[in-house]
C-alpha cells in the first residue's frame, strides 16, 4: 500500500485530520531541507509536500516565488530533490512525501526516468500544478504503474463535470484550492470551503485536503472541521524567508508554527 | 487545426492550474459559438475597416529590391494600422469576445508595448478597465509606449520578478487572472498561452495573410515565391503564413531573435537553435531551458521578441518542415532598420527589422522575377530611443 493511503487510513482510525506542511526544497540552501523535513515530522506533520523550485511559478504568490528564487540561486535541481528524499528515507520510512511543482523540470528529465527515480528514492505522490488530468494521459499511468499517487487540484471554479473527471483520475488525496488566487493570498472562508467540499464527498472516497490561505492554528482548526487534511505553505515559507540569514534557527521556528497548528487541530 | 483539446501534434494543449480551467472552457465555448456567426464576423470586419484602417497596403519596395539585387520585395504594411502594428487585429477580436462575455475588465501582458497599447486602445473605446503587465526592463526600454498606455487610461504594472521581461509579465498576468477570473478577460498578445488562445489569436491575425494573398494575385499577378516574418510568440508570422499553408510553392521563413548570435547562447531563438521541448504558459512547445528544466534568460535588442518559447503551431510547422526558422542577430537587425528607413522612408519596429535582416540574405539568392512578401509588422517610432542610445545620442 502506498504510504499516503496507509497514513490516511491510520488517521481515520484515530479520528484525526492530516496536517500537511509545504516547503520549497533548497530554501534557503539545499543542505537544510532534510533537517527541516524531520523537524516538520517531529512537530506533527502527517505528510510532507516538497516544493520543486521553478523559474516561472505562475500559480504562486510572492512568498513562494521568492523561495523558488532563493533555492534556484543555490542551484537546487529536481535531481537534488530526489537525493534529499533518499536521505530523508534513511531515517524516516513512514512519512509520505509528495513532490509539488510545475511540469517543465519533469519534462526535461523525461517522464519515465523521473517516475523510476522518484519511486526508487521513496517519493509517494506527485502534484504538478500546471498539469490537469486532461494533459496527464501519458504521465498519470506511468506514475500509477510505480505506485506513485497522481494528485490533482480542485478549485472553487471547477465545474461539477470537471470535478467528476478529476475525482476519477486523482489518487492519494484531492487538493482543494480554497480561493481564487495564488498561494499566500488572502485568508480563506471556512464556510465557503465546506460548501464546496460537500458535493465532492458524493463523487469520491479520496481524502479532501484544503490548501491556500491557512495561516495559523485558528484557520487550521476551522478547516480541519470540514476537511480531511490541512495544507500549509506560505506561513512556513515566510518563516524561512525571515530567517534566511540565520538558517540554523529555522527548524525550531518551523516546529513552533506547525506545532501550534497541530495542537489547534487536535484540541 | 488543433485537436479538440488544442494540441498541434505534440505541442499546445492546456497546461494550467485548475482555477483557470473553467475560464478557458468558457472562452472556448464563446469563441466556437461566435467564430462562424455572421453577425460577429461582420462586426469584426467593420472594426477592422473603420477603426484599424484595413486593408493595409501591399507596397512594392522597388528601391530596396534593386539595391539588394535579387527578388522583388513587397511589404505588407501592418505598420499603417491604427496603433502601429499587427497586434490590434487580435485585440479587436478579443475585445469583442470580452464584450460578449460581459466582463468589465481586461488585462494583458506586453513586451514591446505594442500589444499593451493595442489593448489599452480597445479598452478605452469599449469603456473597459485595463491593466497591463510589463517587465520592468521593458518598461525602461519602451518608455514611449508606457506613457501611451497611461494616456489611454490603462494602468501599467511593472513586473520585477525573474528576468523582468515578457515571460515574467505573462506570469504576472496569469496570477492576476487566476485571482480575478470572475470579472476579468485576459487578452493574450500572441499565439502562445493555453488552448484556445493559439487558435483564436491566429484566426484574428489571419486577415493579414488573406489580404496579402488577394493583393499578391492582383498586384503581382500570382502568388509570391516566399513569405518572411519575424517570430516572437509568432502572431504576425502565423497571420501572414496561415492562409498560404496549402500553397506548396510558397516558401516561408520565420525569423527569430538571434541576439548576440545563436552560437553565443545569448538569443531568443527557440526554434532555430533547436531548443528542447518544454511546457510554459499553458502550452508545450520548443522552450529555451537549462538541463534542470529552468527557463533560460533570453537576449534580444527587441523587447517584443525577447521570449523563450514560441507558439505551438510554429513548433509543429518546424517539425513537418513547412516553415524554415532562422535567426537574425542584433547587429544585422540594426543595419536593416537603418537601410529600410533610408531607402524607402519606412521606419520599421526593431521586431520587424528581424524579418528585413533575413530578407537581405534571401533576396540576393533569388531572381528579379521572383517575389518576397514581408510582414512589416509594426512601425519603429517606439524604438527611436533605443536606437538613439546605441548611437550615443541623448534625446
Ligand atoms: C511590431 C511587432 N512585431 C512583432 C512582434 C512579435 O510578436 P509576434 O511574434 O507575436 O508577432 C511584436 C511584439 O511586441 C511587435 O510589436
Image (tube, grey):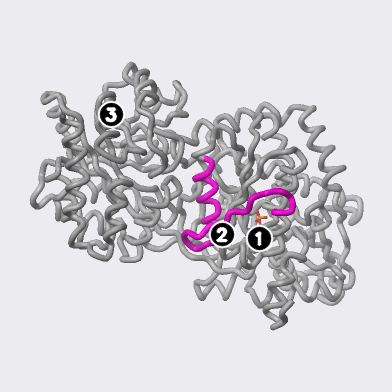
- Is residue B167 in the magenta section? yes
Camera-near label (3 vs 1) is 3
Task: Check residue B135 in the rendering and tell me which mark sits there, or answer none.
Answer: 2
Camera-near label (2 vs 3) is 3
Q: Residues within 10 Å of mark 1 (few under 14, many from 20)?
A: many
Helix, strand or loop at label 3? It is helix
Measure how far apart labels 2 and 1 are at the Cα level: 10 Å
Measure how far apart labels 2 and 3 are at the Cα level: 39 Å
Residue that badge 3 annotates = A222
Camera-near label (2 vs 1) is 2
Task: Check residue B143 in the rendering and tell me which mark sits there, or answer none.
Answer: none
Say yes or no: labels 2 and 1 on the same chain.
Answer: yes
Residue that badge 1 annotates = B112
- Percent coordinates x, y for residue B374 in the rendering: 77, 60
- Which residue reaches farthest left? A91
Q: Is mark 2 within 8 Å of ligand 1?
A: no
Residue at the image position 78 percent from the left and 59 percent from the top: B225
Q: Quadrant of ligand 1?
A: bottom right
- Which residue reaches farthest top? A202
Q: Is residue B76 left or right of residue B326?
A: right
Helix, strand or loop at label 1? It is loop
Identify the chain of the residue marked 3, using the numbered disc in the image.
A
**Magenta part of the protein: which range?**
B150-177
- Percent coordinates x, y for residue A103 in the rendering: 39, 48
- Please identify the quadrant where the N terminus of chain B is shown: top right
Identify the chain of the residue marked 2, using the numbered disc in the image.
B
- Is residue B322 in the magenta section? no
Q: Say whether marks 2 and 3 touch (CB < 8 Å).
A: no
Q: Is mark 1 within 8 Å of ligand 1?
A: yes
- Which residue reaches farthest bottom? B392
- Percent coordinates x, y for residue B347 in the rendering: 80, 68
Amino acid at each position: 500500500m502506498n504510504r499516503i493511503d496507509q497514513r490516511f487510513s491510520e488517521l481515520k482510525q484515530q479520528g484525526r485530520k492530516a496536517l500537511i506542511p509545504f516547503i520549497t526544497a533548497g530554501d534557503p540552501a539545499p543542505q537544510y531541507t532534510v533537517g527541516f523535513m524531520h523537524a516538520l515530522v517531529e512537530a506533527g506533520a502527517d505528510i510532507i509536500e516538497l516544493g520543486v523550485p521553478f523559474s516561472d511559478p505562475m500559480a504562486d504568490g510572492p512568498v513562494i516565488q521568492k523561495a523558488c528564487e532563493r533555492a534556484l540561486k543555490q542551484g537546487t535541481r529536481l535531481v537534488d530533490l530526489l537525493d534529499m528524499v533518499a536521505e530523508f528515507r534513511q531515517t524516516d520510512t513512514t512519512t509520505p512525501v509528495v513532490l509539488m511543482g510545475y511540469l517543465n523540470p519533469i519534462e526535461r528529465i523525461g517522464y519515465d526516468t523521473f517516475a523510476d527515480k522518484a519511486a526508487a528514492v521513496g517519493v509517494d505522490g506527485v502534484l504538478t500544478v500546471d498539469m490537469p488530468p486532461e494533459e496527464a494521459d501519458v504521465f498519470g499511468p506511468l506514475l500509477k504503474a510505480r505506485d506513485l499517487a497522481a494528485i490533482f487540484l480542485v478549485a472553487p471554479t471547477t465545474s461539477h463535470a470537471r470535478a467528476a473527471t478529476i475525482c476519477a483520475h486523482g489518487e492519494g488525496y484531492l487538493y482543494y484550492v480554497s480561493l481564487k488566487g495564488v498561494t499566500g493570498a488572502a485568508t480563506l472562508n471556512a464556510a465557503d470551503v465546506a460548501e464546496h467540499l460537500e458535493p465532492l464527498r458524493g463523487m469520491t472516497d479520496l481524502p479532501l485536503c484544503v490548501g491556500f490561505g491557512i495561516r495559523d492554528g485558528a484557520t487550521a482548526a476551522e478547516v480541519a472541521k470540514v476537511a480531511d487534511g490541512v495544507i500549509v505553505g506560505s506561513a512556513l515559507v515566510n518563516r524561512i524567508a525571515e530567517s534566511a540569514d540565520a538558517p540554523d534557527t529555522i527548524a525550531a521556528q518551523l516546529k513552533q508554527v506547525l506545532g501550534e497548528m497541530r495542537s489547534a487541530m487536535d484540541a | 487545426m488543433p485537436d479538440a483539446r488544442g494540441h498541434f501534434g505534440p505541442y499546445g494543449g492546456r497546461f494550467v492550474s485548475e482555477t483557470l480551467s473553467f475560464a478557458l472552457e468558457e472562452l472556448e465555448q464563446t469563441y466556437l459559438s461566435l467564430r462562424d456567426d455572421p453577425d460577429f464576423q461582420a462586426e469584426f470586419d467593420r472594426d477592422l475597416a473603420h477603426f484599424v484602417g484595413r486593408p493595409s497596403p501591399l507596397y512594392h519596395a522597388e528601391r530596396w529590391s534593386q539595391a539588394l539585387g535579387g527578388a522583388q520585395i513587397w511589404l505588407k504594411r501592418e505598420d499603417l494600422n491604427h496603433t502601429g502594428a499587427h497586434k490590434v487585429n487580435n485585440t479587436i477580436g478579443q475585445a469583442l469576445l470580452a464584450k460578449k462575455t460581459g466582463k468589465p475588465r481586461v488585462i494583458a501582458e506586453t513586451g514591446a508595448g505594442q500589444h499593451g497599447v493595442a489593448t489599452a486602445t480597445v479598452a478605452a473605446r469599449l469603456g473597459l478597465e485595463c491593466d497591463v503587465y510589463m517587465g520592468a526592463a521593458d518598461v525602461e526600454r519602451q518608455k514611449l509606449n508606457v506613457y501611451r498606455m497611461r494616456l489611454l487610461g490603462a494602468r501599467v504594472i511593472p513586473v520585477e520578478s525573474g528576468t523582468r521581461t515578457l515571460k515574467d509579465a505573462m506570469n504576472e498576468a496569469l496570477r492576476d487572472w487566476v485571482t480575478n477570473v470572475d470579472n476579468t478577460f485576459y487578452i493574450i498578445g500572441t499565439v502562445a498561452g493555453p488552448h484556445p488562445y493559439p487558435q483564436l489569436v491566429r484566426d484574428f491575425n489571419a486577415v493579414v495573410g488573406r489580404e496579402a494573398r488577394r493583393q499578391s494575385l492582383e498586384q503581382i499577378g500570382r502568388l509570391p515565391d516566399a513569405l518572411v516574418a519575424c517570430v516572437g510568440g509568432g502572431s504576425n508570422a502565423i497571420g501572414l503564413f496561415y492562409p498560404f499553408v496549402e500553397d506548396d510553392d510558397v516558401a516561408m521563413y520565420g525569423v527569430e531573435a538571434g541576439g548576440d548570435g545563436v552560437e553565443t547562447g545569448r538569443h531568443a531563438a527557440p526554434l532555430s537553435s533547436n531548443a528542447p521541448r518544454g511546457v510554459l504558459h499553458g502550452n508545450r512547445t520548443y522552450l529555451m531551458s537549462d538541463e534542470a528544466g529552468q527557463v533560460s534568460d533570453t537576449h534580444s535588442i527587441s523587447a517584443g521578441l525577447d521570449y523563450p518559447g514560441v507558439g505551438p503551431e510554429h513548433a509543429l510547422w518546424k517539425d513537418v518542415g513547412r516553415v524554415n526558422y532562422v535567426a537574425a542577430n542584433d547587429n544585422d537587425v540594426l543595419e536593416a532598420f537603418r537601410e529600410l528607413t533610408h531607402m524607402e522612408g519606412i521606419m520599421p519596429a526593431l521586431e520587424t527589422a528581424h524579418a528585413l535582416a533575413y530578407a537581405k540574405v534571401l533576396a540576393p539568392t533569388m531572381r528579379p522575377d521572383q517575389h518576397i512578401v514581408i510582414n512589416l509588422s509594426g512601425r519603429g517610432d517606439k524604438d527611436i530611443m533605443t536606437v538613439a542610445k546605441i548611437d550615443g545620442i541623448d534625446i
